[in-house]
Image (cartoon, rainbow, N blue to C red):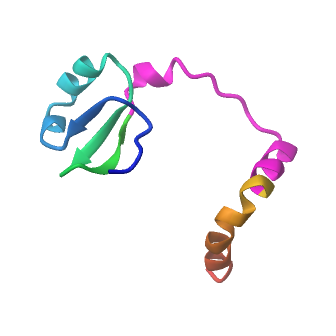
Amino acid sequence: MENLLTNKTASLTEFRDPKNVIKKAGGKPVAILNRNKLEGYFVPASAVHKISFKLADSDEVDAAIAKRKDKIQPILDYLKDK
């Protein structure tokens, strides 16, 4: 199984009742699994409100892209023709 970005998990079956998933997770993000494979993350609004966001200026964006360029280059090459 791959590394998850949260220690809270729920199955797709459990996710049929999202309010119960939120209650059990204590308002924290939940990894949604299907047969022990990650399908996605459910992030309740209460968890997002605790995160502070700031706008990045163009220099910060350029630096982030340059830092990850080796990893994202295949994607950039693919998108070049689109």
Asked whether 46 falls inside the magenta stretch, the response is: yes
* Above or below, comparing residue 51 to residue 17 in the picture: above
- What residue is rendered at 18% in x and 44% in y? 12
* Above or below, comparing residue 16 to residue 76 in the picture: above
* Above or below, comparing residue 51 to residue 62 in the picture: above
Displayed quadrant of residue 28 = top left
Asked if residue 18 lies left or right of residue 70, the reply is left
Q: In which quarter of the image is the C terminus?
A: bottom right
Residue 30, image x, y percentages: 33, 32
Q: Which of 9 and 29 is in front in this view?
A: 9
Q: Which contiguous range is marked in magenta?
A: 43-65
* Above or below, comparing residue 50 to residue 10 in the picture: above
Residue 1, image x, y percentages: 32, 51
Asked whether 18 falls inside the magenta stretch, the response is: no
- What residue is rendered at 24% in x and 17% in y? 23
Extreme-right residue of the structure: 59
- What residue is rendered at 52% in x and 17% in y? 50
Residue 46, image x, y percentages: 41, 19
Extreme-bottom residue of the structure: 81
- All told, the count of numbered labels is 0
Asked if residue 58 lies left or right of residue 1, the reply is right
- What residue is rendered at 27% in x and 23% in y? 22
